[in-house]
Amino acid sequence: MSFELIHNPAKNNYEYHIDEHVAYITYDDQNGNMHLTHTVVPKELGGQGIAKKLLIDVLEAFKAQGKKCVAECSYVVAFQEKNPDYADYFAK
């Protein structure tokens, strides 16, 4: 399953548009550390691994920009704990 990652700077988020639904992760740029504050996947899209795919794409986008992330939403915190191989994407 492949989706196009869309940056929506007006809303400080990255989005997937799937059918008529929008899944997104909201961020807050604090001096180059990207605080990931909210992850939303509409219930109609649940159970398909979309949140994980979206988060990995967002992490890759920030890494390409030379930025580190800070987990603030519960989904991102849980991902960070379960996936130590992504530790270098997060600020210490």
Image (cartoon, rainbow, N blue to C red):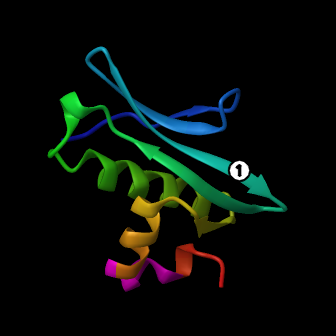
Q: Residue 74 placed where, x, y %?
A: 44, 62
Magenta part of the chain: 82-87
Q: Residue 80 placed where, x, y %?
A: 43, 75
Under circle 1, the secondary element is strand
Along the viewing direction, whichever of 74 and 24 lies nearer the viewer: 74
What amino acid does circle 1 point to? Answer: Asp
Magenta run includes residue 3: no
The dominant secondary structure in magenta is: helix
Q: Residue 54 placed where, x, y %?
A: 38, 48
Q: Which residue is drawn at 27% across and 45% down?
A: 50
Q: Residue at x 39, y 80 (%)?
A: 81
View extreme (right): residue: 31
Name above or below for residue 78 compared with residue 35. below
Magenta run includes residue 85: yes
Along the viewing direction, whichever of 22 and 3 lies nearer the viewer: 22
Q: Residue at x 32, y 79 (%)?
A: 82
Q: Residue at x 16, y 45 (%)?
A: 48
Q: Residues within 10 Å of mark 1 (few under 14, many from 20)?
A: some
Q: Quadrant of residue 1?
A: top left
Along the viewing direction, whichever of 7 and 65 lies nearer the viewer: 7
Residue 20 as seen in the image, left or right of residue 29:
left
- Which residue bears the numbered disc 1? 28
Along the viewing direction, whichever of 27 and 67 lies nearer the viewer: 27
**Image quarter of the C terminus:** bottom right
